[in-house]
Image: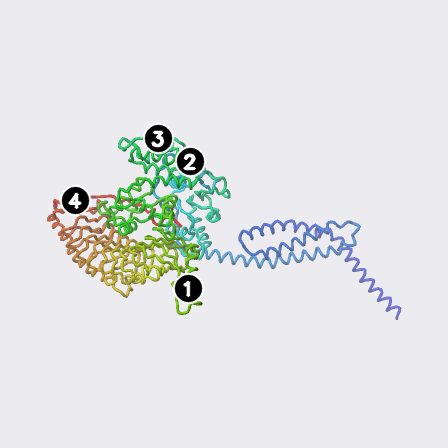
Amino acid sequence: MADLFSGGAVGALMGEALRAAIETINKGREFKPTLEKNIETLNSIAPLVDEMMRYNDKLDRPRQEIQRLQNRVREGQELAQKCSKLTRWKFLSFPHYQGKLHSKDLKLQRYLSMDVQAQNARNLMEVLLKVSEILDILGKEDFGKLSGNQIKGLSGAPEEPKCMGMDKHLSKLRVELLKDDVSVLVLTGLGGSGKSTLAKKLCWDPHVKGKFGGNIFFVTFSETPNVKNIVQTLFEHCGCRVPEFQSDEDAINKLGFLMRHVGKNPTLLVLDDVWQSSEALVDKFRFQIPGYKILVTSRVAFQRFGTPWPLEPLNHEDAVSLFRHSAQLNSKCLYMPDDNLLNEIVKGCKGSPLALEVIGGSLCQQPFEVWQDMKERLEKQSILESSNKDLLSRLQQSLDILEDKFSVSEKECFMDLGLFPEDQMIPVAILIDMWAEIHKLDEDGRKAMTIIHDLTTRNLIKLIVTKKVAKDVDMYYNNHFVVLHDLLRKLAIHQSEREQIEQRRKLTIEINGDDRPEWWVRQNQQGIVSRLFSLSFLPGRLTEQKQLKVAAKVLSITTDENFASDWCDMTADEAEIVILNIRSSQYSLPQFIEKMNKLKVLILTNYGFHCSEVNNFEMLSALSDLRRIRLEKVSVPSFCILKSLVKLSLHMCNTSQAFGNSSIPISEAMPNLVELSIDYCKDLENLPEELCNITPLKKLSITNCHKLSALPRDTANLKNLEVLRLSSCSDLEEMPEGIGRLCNLRCLDVSDCVSLSKLPEDIGDLQNLEKLYMKGCSELSEVPYSVMNFENAKHQIIVLCDEESAALWENVPSIPNLKIETAKEDISLNWLHGVRC
């Protein structure tokens, strides 16, 4: 039995060994096919995984999941490479490595069939969620209602500029821009070389307009561009609801959605005046959209966007033509220079269009002596290659020969233009208010406009009239704006900076975020240390805190959207005008304003897109000399007592708090108000009844307030009212009774009040009426019978109509002193805070 048992056991063991040997032999035989299969699988998967990684990086997604798959493939490749090196002499190792190859293959298959499939399902859900969010945004922004044909005209580009001597440049630039392989083109050149002018001219070029149609957007970057403002303005121009952006990145992303929709047709985006610090920002405006092009103008030749297109100075022949035009050299000029003198002055301008225009304008109607003096001044300038500093020196010569032919220094008025932010249109109405107080000019603006026209003739500034709604003799300037080149703005600022900060008559302060000028911070820190020292070591004695004291009569403070209204202290006892240029949604007036006892004019302009909330407004009650306030794009707070105020101007403001919820009636807050101007205040529906108790009121101008439905019932109590302007109040249906009792009314303007169904029945009782504007009143069907009373007028009465409203007067018997005029309205919509930053 023992033998049998032992023999059976040995047989069993031999059988197991035999099966293991056979399995090992079979694995050895399967080694090569398994290896070849693994290599084939890995070679097909590896490039796909690498491509997945590239897409993953472009989408800025986490790399861990793709890396796990990449690692498995790499490990398999390493094992296959090792097995490929095994020779026949190592056949005993084949079964071992065949098992490893088989195990790796099974693990890879399981990972691909389960883990990767689960990840794909998860990714698909993420894609569906993102698509849902995009569709939601598209729905909210009304993109679906947009078509390229609905976007009319240019966005942000002013009227077509004159471009003398630059026809060749324009033609070459157009050809370069329209090339199929050009997506970004950088137009570069020195300051004043005509880059912006050429870019604006290009927007009006027939070939360019034929290519891009209405999809031409003109954006002025300047030194500190505001991305959110730019994108919001583009949305507004395209007729979409303007969204709120959480960040600059969010704004760019939504702009991408907008441009892809607009991009159904070719699109041109012009980025004007791009500074070196904004190079990376330009890149964010690039989108992979067929037919989408960007034109950049800059003093820097950005190489990252391809070969820049340099704008060379004008050749002598073109320079002479531009100079002759600017100097108005014709048979009526006071002095005609000979060719030698003219050529010498033109050479001194070094081919700079800006210098040619400004110096030419300064010599217009000047005698020989002034021409000769200019030649000598230019000869003394640096003979080095042109630079911005050199150009400023040349422009200075034109400023130095300004004559004091007005009651105020024209140079002083030009310097005032440097108090406003770069590349922003300056309302003429602001300049009139400033100069009426600080230079003692007339309040109607006649002398101010004379100075502005003279500066325009000298090409130091440009005057833009956005909407012609009144006759020139009315001296209504709410639609007049001044613009000046950024180099001329620097020139204006430079005039003030020749003195020490504490002694400057015009002081400009710029604050970005919480970075205040070092000289201001240092002065305040010294004062704090001084006070702490006095408290610690001199008990019972308090020394006055040392703080910055300035002598400026005009103070301009510019802050950006990140400013937290954390002010340093200042003493400005002599300040008569304060200009606050803001961008933030919340803003507090600086406390030191409360101590400006001589302050006469306060101008607060918000250059952000949405209205700003203003705090500390009540401190203005302490200012007994404050006569004029202008607020733009702010939510007007409740009124405080301002007994000396004679003029209040509100432009693009929210007025519900001031006119609806103010605890102090406007007649008590501003009892001596002479002029109230409200323009483009979209929430204004009614004026407070208490307004009719302000008897000194002479001018009441409510324009472009489309929700205004009625005037106060007792408007006829404003016995001293001379001008009542209600143009473009589209919801105004009727006027209150008793308008005929306004015995001093000289001008009544109801033009473009499209819902106005009738004129006041007693309009004929306005015996001092000189002008009636009623153009665009399409609902009017007749004129009141009382107009026959106009025949008693001893002066001429002008009625300005369109053809439709003029027909209403055909049935009225002839009135000797009544003159009916028809006029076409000239409107430019490009001014609407353009696309600026």
The answer to whether marks 2 and 4 mark residues whose Cβ atoms lie closer than 8 Å is no
**438 sits to left or right of 547:** left
Callout 3: few (<14), some (14-19), or many (20+) C-alpha neighbours within 10 Å? some
**Residue 609: horizontal and vertical position, in percent?**
37, 54
Q: Earlier in the sequence, mark 3 or mark 4?
A: 3
Residue holding disc 2 = 313
- Which residue type does callout 4 highlight? Lys
Q: Is residue 466 visible?
A: yes
Which residue is located at x 19 percent, y 58 percent? 718
Q: Nearer the viewer, residue 785 or 532?
A: 532
Q: Is residue 778 visible?
A: no
Above or below residue 110? Residue 463 is above
- State how many labels appear: 4
Residue holding disc 4 = 819
- Which residue type does callout 1 highlight? Arg
The answer to whether marks 1 and 2 mark residues whose Cβ atoms lie closer than 8 Å is no
Residue holding disc 1 = 531
Numbered badge on residue 753:
none
User: Which quadrant of the rendered structure holds the N terminus?
Assistant: bottom right
